Image (cartoon, helix red, strand yellow):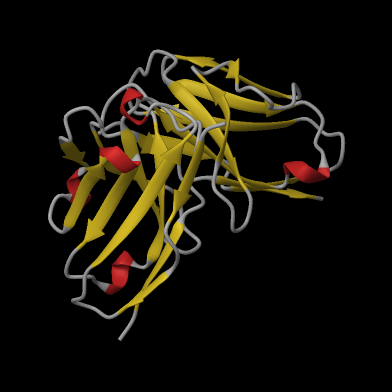
Amino acid sequence: DIQMTQSPASLSASLGETVTIQCQASEDIYSGLAWYQQKPGKSPQLLIYGASSLQDGVPSRFSGSGSGTQYSLKISSMQTEDEGVYFCQQGLKYPLTFGSGTKLEIK
Amino acid sequence: QIQLVQSGPELKKPGESLKISCKASGYTFTDYAMQWVKQAPGKGLQYMGWINTQTGKPTYADDFKERFVFSLETSASTAYLQINNLKNEDTATYFCSPGRYWFAYWGQGTLVTVSS
């Protein structure tokens, strides 16, 4: 199975700050990566797919990049509504696998 | 719009069985496989597997090959997750999601609590 290592496990950011979350795959996943945001008691929401494609309705301050085994999610200007837990997920091979999550809070 | 409506919370004892439903609307049910994801309390997301909505063939991730059964009622655009011989570690929220590579739409989740 492809292992997804996500970092950091948690971070806090000030309003307007740029935030970056990293995800490393155990093998090349050829941009087969998605990012999700989850708020307490809610279902995850797809933010980015194909490593860099923005899902419809997601604010443009979210962006994804990377290739091979290294990927990142950037929030260009932290907003209060961006608090939550973020997960990466590889979509290249079954079984699909998720990163362990990054808890993002407002400082 | 695409919607996935799951059945309500369940409280069960160890050894019992349950069946969770996931009713889809807003798209042709057989156009997308249905995938299942487990989230234990305060934990991350764990992929359980998927069912081919055209053939009914299920595929399970390794941790879910023993007591878990995916099934369909295609005429009702509904997918089911059955868990047999429930264990305490099955306590979690279970999500359904149509798709193949990622999860663009999610059910609201079904909380299953297993406790004696």
Q: Percent x, y for residue A81?
A: 77, 44
Q: What residue is rendered at 47% in x and 49% in y?
A: B5
Q: What residue is rendered at 57% in x and 31% in y?
A: B1
Q: Is residue A37 visible?
A: yes
Residue A62 falls left or right of residue B67: right
**Of A105 and B113, which appears nearest the observer?**
B113
**Of A37 and A4, which appears nearest the observer?**
A37
Q: Percent x, y for residue A13?
A: 78, 43
In the image, residue B89 above or below residue A71: below
Spot the residue most to the bottom. Answer: B116
**Of A48 and B20, which appears nearest the observer?**
B20
Q: Percent x, y for residue B12?
A: 31, 77
- Figure quadrant of residue B51: top left
In the image, residue B37 above or below residue B74: below
Residue B31 falls left or right of residue A67: left
Spot the residue most to the left. Answer: B66
**Of B35 and A17, which appears nearest the observer?**
B35
In the image, residue A27 above or below residue A95: above
Spot the residue most to the right. Answer: A16
Q: Is residue A98 visible?
A: no
- Figure quadrant of residue A75: top right
Residue B16 falls left or right of residue A91: left
Q: What residue is rendered at 41% in x and 19% in y?
A: A32
Q: Percent x, y for residue B42?
A: 50, 62
In the image, residue A7 above or below residue A12: above
Q: Quadrant of the N terminus of chain A?
A: top left
